Image: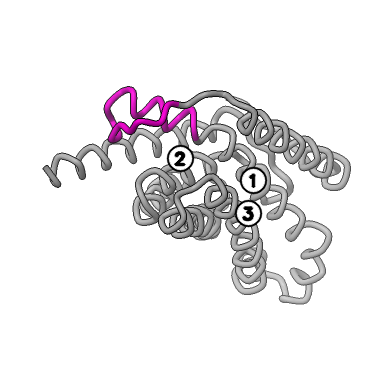
Amino acid sequence: METKINLKKISVAAVLSALAYASVFVLRFKVQFLTLDFKDAIIAITSLLLGPLYGVCSAAVVALLEFLSVSDTGLYGLIMNFLSSGTFALTCGIIYKYKRTFKGAVLSVVMSVISVTAVMLLANLFITPLFMGAPREVVIAMLPKLLLPFNLIKASMNAAITLVIYKPLSSGLKRANLLPRDNKKYRFDLRSAIITVCAVIVIVIAVLVLVLYLGGNLEIFRS
């Protein structure tokens, strides 16, 4: 029975990882050498549904696929991709594993935003100078103007999307018998409406900041 359950989990993780990778080709924003996409939301859902280990593994697989196919930043992009997605998924998964409630889900994505911003701040300080071939002082000067707001925007948008699509996606997987069923049925109720409205507000604000503040170097890619 345990083997059967694990195989189902691996299958679900594989499907969600493929979906996360495919999302990269749908819509992504590029600011200089930084790329904003929405795969972290799907990877985070993998972590929420299956546990932090599956989320981190999904982050690694998707980062590797990007490195082998669409990335133009080489090993640097691979490392930074994994650090960002992996931190987001790990934080989500660990908190939600021990607090499987609505408040726990909200707390998990909020803490994920904070964790990703902090981890990427350190990564930019120590890894980005090597990628750019520039003194660390140059990168430090870029932090408040580009790197910090970009990472905060990216994490916030993915957090908002995670909250909106988590319940519908998990309910669909349960109906398809890919996840254990429970007695709870998904309904778009008042709480769902509030979450959706708040998520949309976060996304709109993030897009406005992205366009108005960082828009001078903004490129948009679609498949």
Residue 144 point in image, percent of width and height: 82, 63
Is 126 magenta? The answer is no
Q: Read off the residue under disc 2.
A: 69
- Do the numbered discs 2 and 1 sit on residues whose CB atoms are within 8 Å? no
How many numbered discs, if any?
3
Q: Secondary structure at mark 1?
A: strand
Q: Read off the residue under disc 3.
A: 110
Outermost residue toward the right in this view: 212
Q: Residue at x 72, y 76 (%)?
A: 136
With 147 as the anchor, is 61 left or right in this view? left
Which of the two residues, 204 or 139, is positioned nearer the viewer here?
204
Residue 35: mark: 1
Whole-number angstrom distance, CA of label 2 to CA of label 3 = 31 Å
Q: Residues within 10 Å of mark 1 (few under 14, many from 20)?
A: many
Which span is picked out in magenta? 167-185
Residue 12 point in image, percent of width and height: 32, 36
Which of the two residues, 161 or 170, is positioned nearer the viewer here?
170
N-terminal label among 2 and 1: 1
Q: Quadrant of the C terminus?
A: top right
